[in-house]
Image (cartoon, grey):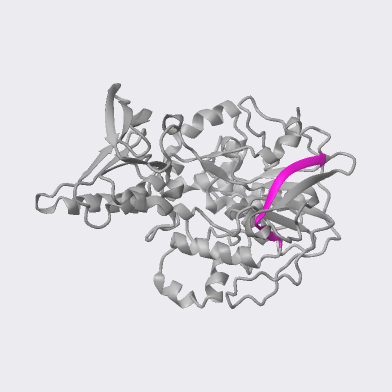
Amino acid sequence: MTPPVPATPHIQGMSATRATEADLADTGQADTAHAPSPGGVYDVVGVGLGPFNLSLAALADSLPSVRAAFFEQEPAFSWHPGLLLDGTTLQVPFLADLVTLIDPTSRWSFLSYLRAHDRLFRFYFYERFHIPRREYDAYCRWVARRLTSTHFGIRVDAVHWDADAGLFRVALTPCGSAAGGNAWSGRVVSARHLVLGIGSEPSVPPAFAGLSPDRAFHCAHYRQRRDVLAALSRITVVGSGQSGAEVVADLLRGPAPLGRHLTWVTRTPAFAPMEYSKLGLEQFTPDYVRYFHGLPQRRKDALLPAQWQLYKAIDADTIAEIYDLLYERTVDGGDPAATLLPGVGVEAANQNGEHGEITLDCRHRDQDQLFALATDAVVLATGYTARRPGLLSPIVDLLDLDRAGRFAIDDRYRVATAAEVTGHIYVQNAELHTHGVGAPDLGLGAWRSAVILDDLTGGHAHRLPPPTAFTTFGPPQPATSAHAAGQGRAGAALLDEAHP
């Protein structure tokens, strides 16, 4: 199927859904006096409330013409709770909050959060761009509680397309403590457009599928389960991205328990630092996203694995801390009680009983040599994968999927659909294969939300920034006397398109 490219009408005549200004005190309550009722037609319904859909909700809050509602089945906002470890920070500067890189004047910025909690002077003296991960989670919870368009404890069960009305019908079910007497109970809401922000799910390689979840679990659950590891002698961490490194650092801090040995295994050829040079980071700009999206899909699929140091490696500070912790253990002849194994893949895993020894069948990739590794527990830092939610099952035949069964996604984050579907389905963080390494990056979250809102409103939402990268991605434009002139013309064209 060929995705239709209809002109998106300007949404108008809808009431605003803004929160009030009475939020300097952190009461934990949203303003319900101006909250939308569960009836009528929404311009957009969001499914899932991670940072990206929360960003969309925050930026939409200043648009009186957009009637929006966002639903999340969890009882409250929670961002990777299993990895909210002491001492961990965001890998992007605080300016990559929900709104600032698009609207620094927004009342939902991180600086507004600090002001509301009387932390501005403390942050001023903190003198760091990279904030504690726990504080980013607290900031997002503060925004989520105050927006009137966000609804937690509500599960989206199914989405249907009503061709006669030209609307999506979204079936809702309250869950958990919200199930009894909830205004949304059993409702089907109508929406002109959808935004899927359900995020990715922990990836567990098939080799580990048969192990006891008490002894082999994804690092997404590490903080809740690390007490289980305290009494065990042999712990293995599989995976060398940032999450794996943070788990290893956490296990190395403090004196090594007598007899404990830590093994760190990764398929990558080295425990390598993440690309963090200033020009290297320009691959996380809208300029590069647009360039990558324009490549043939076969080239994108070949390019992504080679870019692993852009989004699957370790920040330099964490690598340094791990080295220092190992070094300190060896003072005066001490044993580091750790083995680091790069270039090693785990091909199979077997366990002797529910709580027995685990044997990992490993292969050294360069030497093509098999060996066995015995351990008592495995923490899987094996990443996350995008998923196509079951709620789309009623309309799956209307989706235009590629040969690999993935969404076909255009440059405005719209999923390609059959021509009869005149509403749009937008995605957030499900477009790694079409838009590149910036898909899961918080630094591009506000920009992507602004692109979606700009498309929803026919170019009357937030001003999109012109090209800003110093790097020219792709061949230079012919007949351009200076790179800056070309950038300026491109930026002007974009602004004209966004604001006719």
Does the magenta portion include 215? no
Q: Nearer the viewer, residue 416 or 287?
A: 416
Question: Would residue 248 be found to the left or right of residue 1 on screen?
Answer: left
Q: Nearer the viewer, residue 107 or 363?
A: 363
Q: Residue at x 76, y 52 (%)?
A: 44
**What x and y, as percent, mark residue 31?**
70, 71
Question: Would residue 84 be found to the left or right of residue 254 on screen?
Answer: right
- Residue 279 in sight in this render: no
**What x and y, as percent, mark residue 80?**
49, 53
Q: Residue at x 45, y 52 (%)?
A: 82
Magenta segment, which residues?
Answer: 149-161
Q: Up-down: is 114 above or below 389?
A: below
Q: Quadrant of the N terminus?
A: top right
Single out the residue that lies furthest toward the right. Answer: 164
Q: Residue at x 51, y 61 (%)?
A: 137
Which image quadrant is residue 131 in? bottom left
Q: Up-down: is 362 above or below 412?
A: above
**What x and y, as percent, mark residue 424?**
76, 43
Name the dominant secondary structure of the magenta segment.
strand
Does the magenta portion include 155? yes
